[in-house]
Image (cartoon, coloured by chain):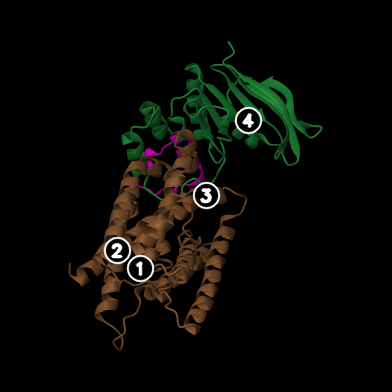
Chain colours: A brown, B green
Amino acid sequence: MDYLLIRMTSSFFAGVLLSHSGSLIQLGTRNILASPSTLGFDGLSILWLLIFHSASLYFNFNFPVEWTFLISAPLFIGLGIFFPRFLKGHLKFEKIILLGLTFNLLVGAIFSLWQFLFMAFNLPFPVELWFGHFRFSSASSLMVILATELAVIFGLKHHFKDLRMYSIGPAMTLNWGIDEKRLFRFIFVTVAITTLVVVNLYGAFSFLGLIFPILARKMWFKNSDLQGELYRGALFNGICLMLIDCLCYFFPIYGAEIPVGLLVTGIGAVSLICILWSGYKAS
Amino acid sequence: MIFMKLLQVQDPHFLPHCGCDLQLTLNRGEALILVGENGIGKSTLMKVLYSSLKPEERVVVEQRTSEYFFDRKLETLKNFFLSGNLPHFDEQAFDELWRAFGLEAREDRQISQLSGGESQALKLTLALCKETSFYLLDEPSQFLDDHRRKILAVYLLKLLEKQKSILIIEHNRHWIPRGWRVQDLVLRNDTLTLGDRWTIS
């Protein structure tokens, strides 16, 4: 297949996955500030992949990224199953977000230190983990992301009624016999796995999981209920990320392509500030 | 006929500041109002009660204020309930409450645009449209005006006629129909226990 076609399809599906994981995590936590970035899923994926990369170098393994995903998946499924317990504790949600952001900062510091050491010893370092891009998209990585997306869509179809009921209110869970544990397991395992897939294959796109669902909600949700956000909204967000990636590809600066992750992290961070500011003004 | 012994709690660590030692029974077709001072554990007791019942045999209306995360039109919500094929859904009851509480006239509004009373009326409608045996309501009349309180009372009386059992925690007793049993809950020796019992006259 043509490189550009693979790259565009990959960026589209990465956008769709990020939109799904953002919508699900915000629905599960009932908080618009929740996202894979603000709750530390991004940071954990980066840290894990960094450890994995270093171990591969040390033991002289050479796994392709698709195999890295398969090896790491059980760990992240475990994380998804465990995470709801953490939310049920006595910590206020704002504190959990602060914890997630602090963890991301810590991972950032570890990442820089690690990069410094690797450069000092002249070892290859996966710089693209922190700011993702689609330069190295391949047919096999596209297959992985496509398979993940199909699994997510299947899960969404299967749990849709419960998700919609849960979106009305927690009382609905009590009254209409929704298995909250099962629903939470689906939500957080999906979030953990989709984050791992995207970070592993293309690197991190921080804050996209936060801003995409809000965009989708604003544009579609009022008219079409939850399916508007989960399907049409995700489609729109996928197209958005694909277009931003096309911009980076077709308009390099002095021959160098800006990592799309860098661009969208900037946009996402500004958006987060705007959301917090508007919340502060409203209060 | 005794329908069910609802609860027998003997827990010295019921709340950080008190234990609990009480036994409540609720007959079929009977309403019981629990009253008591703020902070003695009435809402916690309600939670213990509903967790002791199977999901299909009870409906709960909690005291939470921020119930809805996603904003949506009332019309969308109504369509979801009517077409959702929900187990134990009583369409007639839903229609009756929806109209009586005046939600029909608000169908084109978003949930976020409802007043406190309308929002509470919506919460009650979405809960009471479930056909079940036990209705556990924690301060159901909060934010409701007199007219809507009357609607609630009339609907609850209809439930009693259908031999349903109702347990209510309430501070405001003005809207409660005559003849309903009231059970006072008191703290005695740092233990939540039963106090006086009387009937609304």
Which quadrant would the N terminus of chain A be assigned to in this image? bottom left
Task: Give amino acid for label 2.
Answer: Ser
Decide: few, some or many residues near mark 2? Use Cα within 10 Å; few <14, some 14-19, many ≥20: many
What's the chain of the residue with tag 3?
A
Q: Mark 1 and mark 3, same subunit?
A: yes
- Labels 4 and 3 in the same subunit: no
Of labels 4 and 1, the one closer to you: 1
Q: Does the residue at mark 3 contact the one at mark 2 (Cβ under 8 Å)?
A: no
Relative image position of residue B185 (x, y in whole percent): 71, 29
Q: Contact, CB < 8 Å: mark 1 with mark 2?
A: yes
Residue type (three-letter) at the residue carrying disc 1: Tyr
Are the two marked residues, 1 and 3, in contact with CB atoms closer than 8 angstroms?
no
Amino acid type at circle 3 is: Phe
**Magenta segment main secondary structure:** helix
The outermost residue toward the bottom is: A254
In the image, residue B145 lies in the stretch drawn in magenta: no
Image position of B19 with respect to A131: above or below: above
- Specify which label sits upstream in the sequence, 1 or 3: 3
Furthest residue in direction top, as rendered: B1
Q: Indicate the amino acid at tag 4.
A: Arg
- What's the distance in space between the residues labelled 4 and 1, CA to CA? 62 Å
Identify the residue under disc 1.
A202
Residue that label 4 marks: B173
3D distance between C-alphas at marks 1 and 3: 26 Å
Q: Choose the circle earlier in sequence order: 3 or 2.
A: 3
